[in-house]
Amino acid sequence: MRKTFGLCLFLILALTLAGVASATEITVWCWDPLFNIYAMEEAAKIYAEINPDVTINIVETPWDDVQTKLTTAVMAGQLDTLPDILLMQDNALVKNVTNYPEVFYDLTESGIDFSQFADFKVNHTVVDGRNFGVPFDNGAAITALRVDILEQAGYTVEDFTDITWSRFIEIGKDVLEKTGYPLLSAVSESPDHIMVCLQSAGTWMFDENGDVFIADNEVLKETVEVYVELVKSGVLVQVPDWEQYIGTLNRGTVAGTINGCWIIGTIVAQPEQAGKWRITNIPRMDRAPNATQYSNQGGSSWMVLAHSPNKDVAVDFLKHTFAGSVELYETILPSSGALATYLPAGDSDVYNEPHPFFGGQAIYADITEFAAQVPKISYGVYNYEARDAVAMAISQVLQGWDIDSALREAEETVKFLMGP
Amino acid sequence: MGQVLTLKRRQNLIGWLFIVPASVLIFIFYFYPIVRAALLSFQTGVGVNLQYAGLFNYQRLLADNVLKTSITNVFIFLIIQVPVMLTLALILASLLNDPNLKFRGFFRTALFLPCATSLVSYAIVFRSLFALDGLVNFVLTSLNIVERPINWIGNPWTARALIIIALTWRWTGYNMVFYLAGLQNIDRSIYEAALIDGASGFTRFTRITVPLLKPIILLTSIMSTNGTLQLFDETMNLTNGGPANATLSVSQYIYRLSFQYSPRFGYAAAISFVIFVMVAVLSFIQMRVGDTR
């Protein structure tokens, strides 16, 4: 009785307050209805129970548009056209925070416990020792393989676990010869494969001082060699664009792929392939000194805008959802495959469930384990410049240039773009 | 006397009133941004941290290899595509001007229709038509014209050819309409006289149609040159500048510098003035060559 009375009183109070002060609206920009937007909607539902006065207004904005709108708004000084929260690609976060200081809200003292997130992921959201993003999706790299095809050539997933690239290419040639299937496909002109390999060996296209590290980067040289060998041996087939890359997986013209674990969402979209896929860790570099079997590809984090009049509410919202609710991650994982970097969620039973599409393998537990071992690197301010330059170098090497001169030219290009 | 002046003044005033709205808008949305862009091109720095640095950006672009590549690319497009397109447009226009042609309206509409499509959507349609397993490769392999499907956007020259094919499809009808309009002003009796004198169709085309359309040919070639130098949508959506920057246009490079890379608006503005100067110089040359008045 007393409790009901209290609740009634609270409701009346809340309604009056809502009527007087009107509800606070938090605007969020993010992309992908099946993934980020869905996760945001679920987070809004959870927060509605904690703070019913707040409505979350999600505006679907593709990443390219987020970047363009952000740049335009900041350059024009029209910060009020920006939302309260936006989703940021990890590989552009340092760039945007560095170029637009004071646009993003420093979350270091916000009370969000960043030690609860995977180390490598937090590292992508830190600029000069300050936290600027709440880590979200996991981009831990996986090797996904079609066991039915491998079987025809006499291999299993175990043969691909904890191996080197030279062994991978060796098996790849054998599989190609026996079954006619290439192991991998990749978008030509895309440097993603190189990037995965670089991070797996704990290095990047910039050194710790942020200077270009391309021409004399032995690891980068080795990754380019591996890529060229993959293409020339036919173990990796290049396709012109992303749609056709997806096509090779869904139509089953390749025996596997290496990518961020979010590629699972695409793989499971083909129900007739159910049970035929398994995942494992990625091959390690043969010569690189810090080679590991783990890397990252893609991923994004939530950022709060510093000019927002509701930034405290926005921070509180993130604190209670993406940085504090195991329930949220339990809800979004099974339906969207949105794998978290929020470590407490990894202990949840949902993560240990066998996945029928992957023959009962507990893939989420495996990926969480991979994610914990991804080497920490910083993508740097000039990441996009370097990506384009290295992509160009790969193209040149495939057209017959020698690796050293192609990488030297790439370094010159990036140096020029970084110049005064 | 006073009465006359007042009337004149009043008419002048009315004339000015007609001009003022358009002029004000042009000043606000054209000239003011141009001045601001010029000022911006003298500033250097990344993101919002800009300082004045005189002609530094203009000096910097002399050493820019990517800019050189992109200028070479647009000139390749310009030199191959514009003459092909304008010749095609001229031929089509004179064919469609034949009063005895059946379904003239249908053909005219059909040829003009590509111009009504959005630049982005047509680029995407072309991309799928010319995909590795797209319609074009299917037709080419089925007819045994090529042995294996062509990776159009994978090789520098096929990618450039693809851009040129796409541009020609999109813009030929547009230029044709200008020529059709111009042809309406040529007196039929000139053609009849030529016919009586025994001039062949080809002679009539080269000796009557082309010379009398010269001002319009000049106009379309200046417009096409201008459009090609500022090419953006097609390379962005069809090939994304690839492979290895072989189809990167100057405008796309400006876009990369402004929105994809760490933004250098000052430098990007300087490059946009390079396009401006190129357009001005080329238009001047074309006027000198084309205008014999």
Image (tube, rainbow, N blue to C red):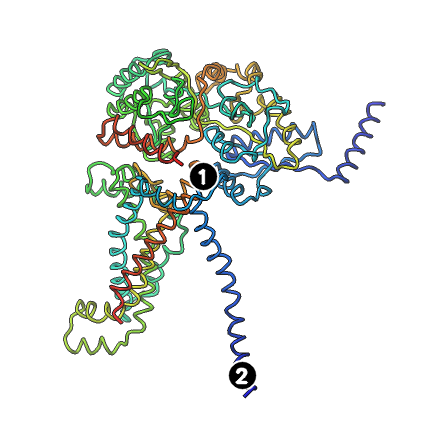
Circle 1 is placed at which residue position? B45
Is residue A361 at all visible to an observer of this figure? no
Image position of A121 (left or right of A388): right
Spot occupied by residue B163 in the image (x, y as percentages of width and height): 30, 46
Q: Residue at x 49, y 16 (%)?
A: A368
Relative height, residue A15 to residue A354 (above, below): below
Relative height, residue A68 to residue B23 (above, below): above
Image position of B190 (left or right of A75): left
- Given the image, on which type of amino acid does mark 1 rest? Gly
Q: CA distance from mark 2 to mark 1?
A: 57 Å
Q: Residue at x 55, y 33 (%)?
A: A37
Spot occupied by residue A95 in the image (x, y as percentages of width and height): 47, 32
Q: Which is nearer the eye, B192 or B288? A: B288
Q: Name the N-terminal-most of marks 2 and 1.
A: 2
Circle 2 is placed at which residue position? B5
Q: Residue furthest bottom?
A: B1
Q: Residue furthest front?
A: B54
Q: Which is nearer the eye, B165 or A308? A: A308
Secondary structure at numbered mark 1: loop
Is residue A112 at all visible to an observer of this figure? yes
Please identify the quadrant where the N terminus of chain A is shown: top right
Q: Are marks 2 and 1 in contact (CB under 8 Å)?
A: no
Check the residue under mark 1 and report the chain it is in: B
Relative height, residue A337 to residue B135 (above, below): above
Spot occupied by residue B119 in the image (x, y as percentages of width and height): 39, 50
Q: Residue at x 27, y 70 (%)?
A: B100
Please identify the quadrant where the C terminus of chain A is shown: top left
Spot occupied by residue A377 in the image (x, y as percentages of width and height): 44, 21
Give the number of callouts: 2
- Given the image, on which type of amino acid does mark 2 rest? Leu
Q: Which is nearer the eye, B3 or A390? A: B3
Please rate how many residues cluster around mark 1, counting C-alpha atoms within 10 Å: few if below 14, some from 14 to 19, many from 20. Answer: many
